[in-house]
Amino acid sequence: MNKYFLVIDQGTTSSRIVLYNKKFEIFDIVQKEFKQYFPNEGWVEHNAIEIWNDVRGLIFKILKKNKLVSRNIISIGITNQRETTVLWNKKTGKPIYRAIVWQDRRTANLCEKLKRKGADKIIQKITGLELDPYFSATKVKWIIDNIKDAKKYLKNDNLLFGTIDSWLLWNLTEGRSHITDISNASRTMIFDSQKEKWSEKILKIFNIPKKILPTVVENAYNFGSTKLFGDAITIGGMAGDQQSATIGQACFKRGQSKSTYGTGCFLLMNIGKKFKLSRNRLLTTVAFKINGKKMFCYEGSIFVAGSAIQWLRDNLKFIKDSSETDKLYKKANKDENLFFVPALTGLGAPYWNPNARGTFFGITRNTSKEDIIKATLDSLSFQTYELIECMEKDSKTKISEIRVDGGMVKNNSFLQSLANISQIKIIRPSNIETTSLGAAYLSAIQSGHLKNTNQINKLWKKDKIIKAKISKSISNSNIVKWKLIINAVNNFY
Ligand code: ADP
């Protein structure tokens, strides 16, 4: 009987189910996009019920399509969009409000107010994070403060909080497991990443009751089992998408870095076993805890990456499919000095300005759609470069190569732009679905099919290396211009 690891990869714009064979090769993928809600300026919501129905439906679909039954599945791994916040009633199983998505900026004022009181320092010291609407804490507070039923359910002990991982697990196990893993917990802004427990001090700041929080465990663990697809299947692995990609990219050594280009872009650098705070406004976050061994990373988050390409497609109607940007980039006029700061939902690291908005510099009578596409892709290279600079300063190590993944790295023009601007070797692995691969590895560790991270390291394979084709001095002069521009945008808003 053929056996597979089944991974639930619940992303920001779509849910995917990926089957891996025992050699960790992709056997099949099914995917479904879901609806994004923008009820107010800067607000982004998802329907958590729709997400769960899609995930369950996709699992049935992939099993049926391949004539498989639950006994063909060794175990399940979950990886997910992080920080997105769901509060639900444990009696009815219904969310009390739509999921508030990581991109949502509605709590910007609350964050400002708390910063003025000095809460940001306490929060950074305990969680490693910037006080920002991005993380779950202020989203939880917003729901409790604004949704009528929240207080009633809280009083009756019927309210539960979870990020998408916990929400899916709770549904898969029909309410038996209310658990999250350490990588997801470290993104809530209420978790003490060193002591590995919810921080009483921070819970007090946000007035969040501890009783609604899930239990926190390691990434490879017996999270419970699901009986919804026939015989029981163990859920054996769980990690937030970026940490999962770090595992999928086998960045297990101090100094190794990966950058994922999906809806947003996330550069993570392994900094070893010690929790160290950044002096350059990066985040310190738990990379993973496997077999009792915990590692940390620095993370730089760029909120808008592939979503800028979606904006070119859906709002400007420049393209029908995001892949067209690869060819159109090459047709751009090399003499145009067009820059785009794609702060469509604010600026992430190292600026942390939720109020910033997108801005073009240098539009002329000749500016074409191709130039705008090029400026959009280049903007991600410039932002990545700035994060590399911060990481090198913080870690006092030189980054000599970056492993890249995510939907956008199929775009060769973009990868060349990245190599040109950063002047660093860019490596694309043979499996760019590293997010789901990481979760497959975790569930394989739990099931005993893999022993440790050394074995994962041996499985990592490169596909392509991209090196700079322009000189360092040309790239430097563009970087100088970029910095003037992004600082102008940051100061304006
Ligand atoms: P997520 O997991 O965050 O939903 P993915 O890793 O699936 O994202 O990547 C999807 C994103 O990548 C979309 O925003 C899409 O616009 C962008 N994308 C996909 N293919 C390309 C391409 N060839 N060129 C540029 N952008 C692309």
Image (cartoon, helix red, strand yellow):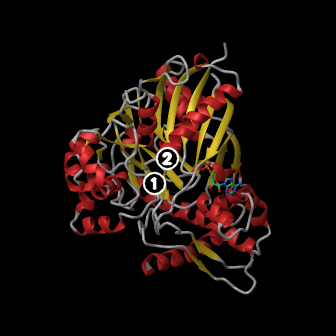
Please identify the quarter of the rendering in which residue 364 is found.
Answer: bottom right
Tell me which amino acid carries mark 2: Gln
Dot 2 beta carbon under 8 Å from ligand 1: yes
How many C-alpha atoms fall within 10 Å of the one at disc 2: few (<14), some, or many (≥20)?
many
Q: Farthest residue in the bottom direction?
A: 365
| Residue 22 drawn at (x, y percent) | 63, 22
Residue pictured at 50% horizontal, 29% vertical:
442
Q: Is residue 361 visible?
A: yes
What's the mark number on residue 101?
A: 1
Q: Give the percent coordinates (x, y) of residue 120.
A: 27, 61
Q: Position of residue 154 (x, y in %)?
A: 24, 44
Q: Is residue 108 above or below residue 283?
A: below
Identified at 69% across, 48% down, the residue is 465
Q: Would you place residue 303 above or below residue 430 in this image?
A: below
Decide if residue 439 is on the left or right side of residue 475.
left
Q: Quadrant of the N terminus?
A: top right
Give the label, 2 or 1, closer to the camera. 1
User: At 45% across and 47% down in the image, what residue appears?
Assistant: 82
Question: Mark 1, residues whose alpha carbon is within 10 Å: few (<14), some, or many (≥20)?
Answer: many
Disc 2: which residue = 81
Query: In the picture, which quadrant includes the C terminus?
Result: bottom left
| Circle 1 SS class | loop
Q: The residue tagged with tag 2: helix, strand or loop?
A: loop
Q: Which residue sits furthest top?
A: 1
Q: CA distance from mark 2 to mark 1?
A: 9 Å
Could you say which disc has been placed on residue 90 in the image?
Answer: none
334 vs 245, left or right, is: right
Residue at position x 65%, y 31% in the image: 61
Q: Name the amino acid, label 1.
A: Val
User: Is 240 displayed left or right of 478 in the figure?
Assistant: left
Query: N-terminal of the two: label 2 or label 1?
Result: 2
Dot 2 and dot 1 residues touching (CB under 8 Å)? yes
